[in-house]
Amino acid sequence: MGPVIEAQGLSYEYPDGTTAIRNVDTTVERGERVAVVGANGSGKSTLQLALGGLIDPSTGSVRYFGETTDAEAVRERLGVLLQDPDDYLFNATVREDIEYGPAQLGVPRDVAERRVDRLADQLGLLDLLDRPPFRLSGGEKQRAAVASVFAFDPNVLLLDEPFGAVDPQYRERILDLVTDHEGTFLLFTPSLDMVPEVAERVILVGQNGSIVADRSVREVLTDSSLLVENGLRPPAPVEMFEGVLDRDELPLTVSEARRYLLKREQ
Amino acid sequence: MTGVVARSAESITGALRAVFTAEQVAAGDGFLQQRDPRVTLLSVSGFAIAVMLTRSLSVTVMFGLITAVLAWLSAVPLRRLATRCAVAPFVSALIVFPQVVLLPGDPLVQVFGLAVTDAGVAYVVLFTMRVGVGVALLSLIVMTTKFSSIIAAMRELRIPVTLVWVIAVTYRYLFLFFDELWRLILARNSRTTGRLGSRGGWYDAKQLAGIFLLRTLDCGERVGQGMRARGGDRPPSPYRRSRTIDMYDYTLAALAVIVMVGTVVIRWGL
C-alpha cells in the first residue's frame, strides 16, 4: 500500500503570531478514509492547506506518495477543496470553473467534457453550467466547487466541509461521490454526524492545534468526555444511548439506532 | 448605503460587476461568436490598434460605425456595449479636458476669463472618441468570445506566456475584486440606517476603502490557494475552442488588414 501523505513535525504560525497547528505528525496510507475533526478555530482548515501543499509550514514537512515534498509535482493527484466555495469559483461560468482543473492539469478535453457532464448531472448543475458562479446560491456554489475538485479525478481528496450549505438531497449525492471515490480521502469537518458513514479513522484536532486522538471512528465518537473537552458533541445516537448500552454497542448513526430499536421490539 | 461617494461606489461596482460577468452574449449565435477565436482576437484588436493610430475624426467615426455594425451582427445590444464602455472614455475626457483651454487655436468662447479654443475642443472630442471606440472594440472581443477561448487563442498564437498569464490573472482578480466590493457594500447596507451628510459619506467611504483593501488582500490569498489547488501554478492552458477557418473568417481578417493599412496611409501619408 504505502503512505500517500506523511507529515512530520508540522506547525504553522500566522503572521499575527497565532499558532494554528502545532507539531503534527501523521501518516495517511493509500486507500484510507480519514475524518479530521475539531471545533471551530482548532486549525483543521490550516492543517488541510498545509497537507495539501498550499501553505508552507513554519516547521516540519509533508511527503507525498513516498516520492517528494513538493506538492506541485504531484498536484494532479491531490484534490484539495477549500472551505469557502467562493475561493474556488473565479471563472466566468460554472462550466469553465469545473473545467479549470482538468485543463490546467493536462486532462484531455474530451475526457474532461464527459466528466463535467457526468458531475453536473449528478450534482444538479446541468442548468447552471453557463451561469456566472456569483449568481448561484450558497448550496449551488458548494456543489459547483465539489464538482470542480472531482473533475480532475485526483487520487487523494482533502475536502474541507464539502457538505457546507448543501440541502439534504444533494448532501446525499455528494456523500455518494465521496464514498464511491476509490482513492484516499481526508474529510475536514466539525460535524460528526457524517463521519461514521464515510470514514474508518478519526484524527481529532484539539483547540490548541495539536492532534489529541488518532483512532478508529468508534473509539473516538463514543468517547464523549474526550469530544466535549475538545469543543465537540458526540453524534445524536451516541448521546441518546449513552448509559443505556455498552460503549462498543452504541449506535453511531441514525440508521444503526433504528436497527437497534427495531431488533429490540422484536 | 448613504452618501454620494458610497452611492457612487455602489453603482460603479454594480455596473462593472456586470461587465466582468456578462458572457451570456458570448454563448449566442452572432457573427463574431461564430468566428474562430484567433481570427476575432487578431482582427478586432487590429481595428482597435488602427483607432489608436488615427488622428482623424472622420476615420474615428468610421471605426465607430464598424464597431456598431459588428455589434449588431453579433447580437450585442448597443446599449449594453455603451454602458460597458462608458467609464474609460469618461475618465479619459476628464483627464484631457484642460486641453480645451491649454491648446492654442481660435477662441470659441470665454469661460472664467479663459479662452476655449477650437483646437482644444477638437482634441478632447477626438481623444475621447478614440478611447471610447477602442474600448468598445476590445469589449466586443470579450463579449462575443468566452474568456477561456481568448486565453486559449493567445496561447495558440504564441503570445508570450507571461503576458497571457498576467491577462488571465488580472481578469479573474478584477472579477473577484468587484464581487468582494459588492458583498462588502451589501453587508454594510444591511447594518446602516439613516442618511449621512457629505462629511459622513466621505468618512463612511474612507472606512469602506480601508476594510476593502484588507479584504481583497485576504481574498486574493485564498483565491490564489484555490487556483494552485487545481494547477494554477502552471501556465494558463484552457481548452482550445478553435474552429475551421471559413470564408467569413478570411473576410474579417482581410477587412482588418485593409483598414489598418488604410489608417497608416491616411495618418502618415505613405
Image (tube, helix red, strand yellow):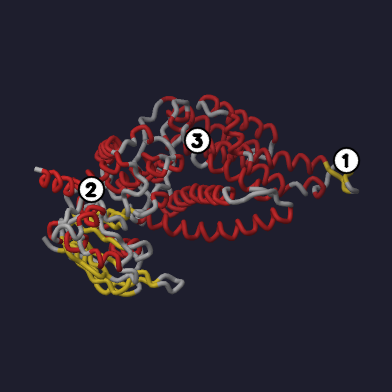
Left-right relation of B109 to A245: right
Q: Position of residue B17 (x, y in %)?
A: 54, 43
Amino acid type of disc 2?
A: Val
Above-or-below relation of A59 to B256: below
Mark 1–mark 3 distance (CA, rounded to whole Å): 41 Å
Disc on res. B143: 3
* Residue closer to the observer: B43 or A33: A33
Q: Name the mark on residue B269.
A: none
Task: Look at label 3 and name its amino acid.
Answer: Met
CA distance separating discs 2 and 1: 75 Å
Q: Looking at the picture, which amino acid does disc 1 mark? A: Val
Eye-nearest disc, 2 or 1: 2
Q: Nearer the viewer, mark 1 or mark 3?
A: 3
Q: Position of residue B27 (x, y in %)?
A: 43, 31
Say left or right for B242 vs A239. Answer: right
The reply to the same-chain question for discs 2 and 1 is no
Q: Give neighbour class at mark 2: few <14, some 14-19, many 20+ (Cα, 10 Å).
A: many
Question: In the rendered image, which residue does mark 2 sit on?
Answer: A178
